[in-house]
Every structure is written in C-alpha cells, then in structure tokens.
Amino acid sequence: MTMGEYGKKQLVEEKVFKDPVHRYIHVRDQVIWDLIKTKEFQRLRRIKQLGTLYLAFHSAEHSRFNHSLGVYEIVRRMVVNFQEFKEWNNEDRLLALAAALLHDLGHGPFSHCFETIFDTDHEEFTRKIILGNTEVNAVLKKVSVDFPLEVAKVIDKTHENKLVVSMISSQIDADRMDYLQRDSYYTGVSYGNFDMERILRVMRPGKEEVIIKESGMHAVEDYLMSRYQMYWQIYFHPVSRGGEVLLDLALKRAKYLHEDGYEFKQAPKYFIPFFAGKVSVEDYLRLDEMVVNFYLQEWIHEDDEILSDLAHRFVNRDLFKYLPFDGSVITISEIEALFEKAGIPPEYYFFSDSYSDLPYDYDRPGSKSNRRPIHLKRNNGELREISTQSAIIHSITGVHRMDSKLYYPKEKILQIEDLEVKGEIINLLNELA
C-alpha cells in the first residue's frame, strides 16, 4: 500500500480528548482527526455502548463514540511500544489506528439487541459504510485508493496482516481492554478493573499476533477473570435483558401491524426498510437511538393496545417479571397454551431468553473453537499457550456457561378472571422459581 502525503500529514498542534478511563486521548494524525469529524463517526454519539443496560445501572449512558476513541487510544499506545521491535512495521501504523477508530462504525441503535430483531450485522454494515459513498470513505481514499478496503479487511478479520488484526480483535485486544474498563467505570462497579498498564508493557508484536511476555501472565489472568465477571454480573443482568425483551416485542408488533395494513398515528417511516429486510447504508445511518425512542414514545398513543402497552413499558421502565428457567420446551408450551386460554397473546407477553459465555477457549484437538490462543513468550523466545502455564486460566478454558430466564407480565396474570387457568399458570411459574 502506497501512502501519499495526506496519510503522513500531522496536525500543527496535537488534539486531546479528556477521558475518564485513559485520562487523555491523543490525536496527531490529520487522517484520524478528519475521520472523527465525519457524520458517520459522529453518529456514534447517538448509539449507547451498552444498549438497555441503563435500565439496570442508571449511569451506563456512555456511547459507542466514547468507546471507539478509547480503542484508538489503546492501539496508539501499542504502536508506540511496538516501534522498538523488529517484528513491527511502522508503515502499518495508520492502518492500525484507523481500523481501531472505525471498528464499531456499523453498530445500530441498542446494538446487539437491534441486530437480533432485524437480522442485521454491525460488522457487515461497518464494511459497507467504509466502502460506500460516505464521508468516512472519502477521507480514507485520500490516503490511497485501496486504503478503505485495507481498513475494512482489518475490521472483518480477513486482512493478511494478522498482527494488526489481533491488536483490535483477539482474546486480548484493544477493543476488550477498553470496554471492560469503560463499562466498569460507567456502571459503577469494579469487576472490569485490571492492570492495563502492565499488559501494555508486556505486549510484544509477533509475526501473526500480539504475544505476551511470560512475566505478564498474572496480569492476563486478572484481565480474563475481569471479563468473566463483567459478563455474568453486568452484561447478562436480567433487568437489562428485560429491557431488550420489551424492545424486541414492541418492534415485532410494529412490524406485524405495518404488514397487516394498520394505519399508524405515527407511521414507522424509518423502520420500513428494516421491516422489509431491504436496508441501504443511507437507511441504516438514518436510524439512531434518538429516532427509535421517538417512535416508542409516539406509539404509546396508538390505538393498538399491545403496541401501546409494550411501548409504554419500555419508555417508562415498567418491565416484565423474570424467573430462572431450565430450558424445558414442555413447560413453555404449557404456559403459552394457558396464556392463550386467558386471552393474553403469548407471542407478546411470554418470552424465554437464553445466553452463554466462553471466557477463554482456543482451537485445539477435540474442541469446536476457531479462536486463536493467547501465547506467552518465554525468555528463550519459545511460545507457550497460556493455559498450559496458568492454573487459573486452565480452570476456565473451554468452560461454556449458560443461563436462561422467562419474562412475563405478573399483573396481567393476577387479573385473569378464569381462576382455574390463573391457578395453573401461577403453579407452573412457582415450580420454576
């Protein structure tokens, strides 16, 4: 890749962003500064990093914009540290910085919840935005004609430079190191805290991956356990998942009504491409959380009782109750049938939610993982997979933990007039509790 003068251009004076996690985020490259100013990147200010988690942790209001700058800053620091090693080619510097900054460009409103509802893929849209007729694409093309594609390939993990890919996407990368600390800070918990300064000091550039100096093993243990705790204590919090359930059901109802010819008081204009499954980059960029929340607030006043109720519940945090659940299909079908008898449509008022996490795994004989391992570098230069050296990491390697919850509106059950049906539903739910 041949880089012109624009790709080498530095700002006359360094720009800094004050940041609660990294103290300062430093920008000296003209390209990075111009990318930050594009409308596609500024849109990330209107996309929450943690979707509906603010319903459980009131201060979790930070954005994908904050996080993207944080990932860029960590990669910038990695690059500074890597420059003293022969394995690092400094011509890859701008590629790594641009990919770090833009890695989440394609996230939609409420992030992963939105992807599940409309079967979209934020990584696919990140690629489309970078390669499409956008301000981001125009900036990247000024570096070189093929630079947008190079950046896109790093983000979707198809680039031949595996080292740069691993800096942004691996089992110990800048993305995870930022979101664990940032999400911990904004939720007010300490689970996500680990010694990032130490990890950055012991990171080394390898031929195809970032590797860790053997003396840094305990810092990596701390990092992996932080990730484990954050997923089960924060990211999988049942109240946050309950918000996602309501959002899912409200948009499912709006889609059904649109397809059924219902006349909305507030027509879902910006949702129609998503309902139809024909979403252009322009359609995608137009929809942010401000727009989604506008529709939900308007739909409270719709004549359709189900949409109005679900929208009201989401906007005003009137969440469904939840119970732990063992995944029994028989129990679900029994309760759904009883809901039907009671006149409560189960497709909108009864929801089973399952989630799982694999804190550390890697491709090895007998496993189904395609993840690359974390390697430790010994003093003699030999590489060792980290779980062979750490008893703590060995104990969680390949451990796949799952959990399930059932969500339902308790007050609607208590209002059922048929006492026999009401009693059967309550008994089934009590058996699960």
Image: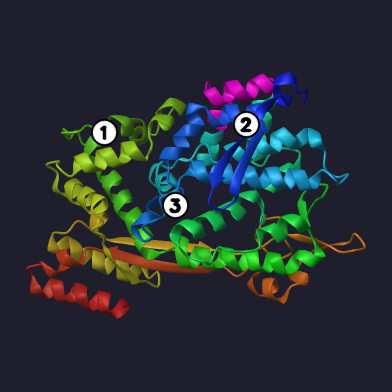
Q: What span is in magenta?
A: 127-145
Residue at x 39% of width, y 30% of height: 286
User: Splitting the image into 4 quarters, where does residue 239 fall?
Assistant: bottom left
From this viewpoint, is residue 168 visible?
A: no
Name which residue type carries label 3. Leu
Q: Label 3, on which residue?
A: 50
Q: Label 2, on which residue?
A: 32
Q: Residues within 10 Å of mark 1 (few under 14, many from 20)?
A: some
Name which residue type carries label 2. Ile
Which element type, helix, strand or loop, lies under badge 3? loop
Viewer-proximal residue among 425 and 125: 125
Image coordinates for residue 22, horizontal then vertical, percent: 60, 51
Residue at x 52% of width, y 27% of height: 38
Left or right relative to 302: residue 367: right
Image coordinates for residue 432, horizontal then vertical, percent: 32, 77
| The label number, if any, that marks residue 281 in the structure image | none
Dot 1 or dot 2: first in sequence order is: 2
Viewer-proximal residue among 339 and 189: 189
Name the quadrant of the C terminus: bottom left
| The label number, if any, that marks residue 268 in the structure image | 1
Left or right relative to 72: residue 320: left
Judge depth for marks 1 and 3 and give the one in front: 3
